[in-house]
Amino acid sequence: MAKITYNTHDSKTHTIDVQNGLTVMEGAVQNDIPGIDADCGGGMACATCHVYVNEEWLDKLPVKEDGEEDMLDMAFEPKQNSRLSCQLTVSDEIDGLVVNIPSKQA
Amino acid sequence: MNKTDVLIIGAGPTGLFCAHQLGIIGLSCEIVDNLDKVGGQCIELYPDKPIYDIPAVPECTGEELTNNLLQQIKPFNVKFHLNERVEELKKVENRWYVKTSGSQEFDVASIVIAGGVGSFEPRKFPLKECEKFEGSSLFYSIKDKTIFKDKTVSIFGGGDSALDWAIELSNTSKVNLIHRRDGFSGAESSVQKVKELNDQGKLNLFTKYQIDSVLGDKNINTVKIKHDDGETKEFKTDYVLGFFGLIMQLGPILDWGLNINKKTVEVNTENFETNIDGIFAIGDICSYPGKLKLILSGFHEGALAARGCFKYAKPDEKLRFEFTTTSKAAQERLGVKK
């Protein structure tokens, strides 16, 4: 179990206990956190679970696979701290992670 | 007016197999799709990627699956209406009147929505001011490349569309290619070609830049781009092109009075009918307890929805369950009767 904080675009903060093994995307979807659409269901085939990761967490996350960077090209306003939340698997190591959800996904 | 038993919205694998199941039980159908080709997500998102969970097919690509399904429905001569999006839906007595974006009209007994996660639309620039130039000096697809001749064109994106158009237009236009990072998702050979053209001064490549603003009165005359480190550049341009792939939007389906839950349409699991009689939903777009977004689930849903359509198309007849191995009627419809 890890605490994941989702800052939504309406300036609300949602801190959720997410089970290890789920993804950060699934944690948001299962808890009805607005702004993560995840159209493709976690297959890295869309870019609608795009989040901005708080800087201090950037190095602590698993590195991006090629496909993730390619999909981020398609995201709405990608930045250097952009990730696809379907590629971030929850574990004790990322307890406390803070992600910011963009103003829209498309 | 196109008159048929069933209108299928969406030409992905689920819609195609539903057409097969309708054909087997003797119903006619036509298929509408917003894309310019058949195959849905299989073709648009992963034509070359292998799929490993189609029953009895150990491995096939999205393109192969689509071609096989087309082969399978060939006997039924299904009519496709591509590049068309269903806009309007109206109940007329016991039938449905449907109108598309291209003003195609249909008179059908029932409708099967097999729309995946919605219709594909180009992803757009995040800037609000881009909207007013759209269609005049800003485009997300190219219909007539001759308008760019001898003009300055600024292309944004790093996929195959962006690279291919940058290469092609560099012959006759002054091309700026702008991409948010050094890596590209397009084909390696195209990346090399673009870099060569840049070295030869035949196009200008800017990486780690993104769009900052566009300026102009009626048409765009200037585009401003911003580097990752905050530095900005500004240059004159006649046209701006954005190639950021496609997004999926539910679109007009939202306005039809269907029960929608998280961008999906609620259905029953007996025949995948929605809360509106005569409208069915199958594949990724439908939801029910336990729903799996797999192609194989879409096939099952299509088979049952097809049977659900029967009573609307032929209210005075009774549908008999039959196997294709033994049914003379089914074999005749398939054109295989000896």
Image (cartoon, coloured by chain):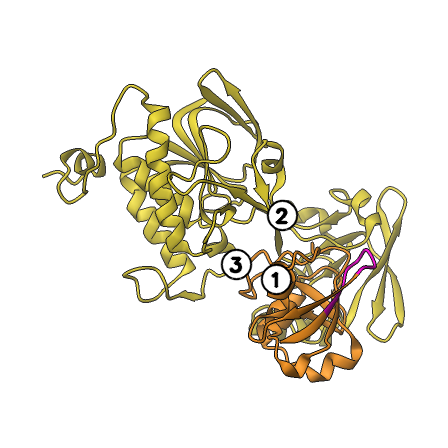
Chain colours: A orange, B yellow
User: Nearer the observer, disc 2 or disc 1?
Assistant: 2
Q: CA distance from mark 2 to mark 1?
A: 20 Å
Name the one closer to the observer, B314 or B231: B314
Q: Chain of mark 3?
A: B
The residue indicated by pointer 1 is B164
Residue B194 image-quadrant placement = bottom right
| Whether residue B200 can be seen here | no
- Looking at the image, the residue that sits furthest to the left is B338
The residue indicated by pointer 2 is B121
Q: CA distance from mark 3 to mark 2?
A: 13 Å
Name the one closer to the observer, B218 or B286: B286
- Looking at the image, the residue that sits furthest to the top is B93
Three-letter amino acid code of the residue under disc 3:
Leu
Q: Is residue B208 above or below residue B83?
A: below
Tell me what residue is drawn at x 87 percent, y 51 percent: B221
Q: CA distance from mark 3 to mark 1?
A: 18 Å
Q: Earlier in the sequence, mark 3 or mark 2?
A: 3
The residue indicated by pointer 3 is B45
In the rendered image, which quarter contains the C terminus of chain B?
top left
Q: Earlier in the sequence, mark 2 or mark 1?
A: 2
Residues rendered magenta in the picture:
A5-12
Q: Is residue B156 left or right of residue A20?
A: right
Three-letter amino acid code of the residue under disc 1:
Asp
Q: Position of residue B59 (x, y in %)?
A: 34, 66
Q: Chain of mark 1?
A: B
Around disc 1, counting alpha carbons within 10 Å, would you say few (fewer than 14), some (14 to 19), or many (20 or more)? some
Around disc 3, counting alpha carbons within 10 Å, would you say few (fewer than 14), some (14 to 19), or many (20 or more)? some
Q: Position of residue B272 (x, y in %)?
A: 42, 40
Three-letter amino acid code of the residue under disc 2:
Glu
Q: Main secondary structure of the magenta part?
A: loop
Q: Chain of mark 2?
A: B
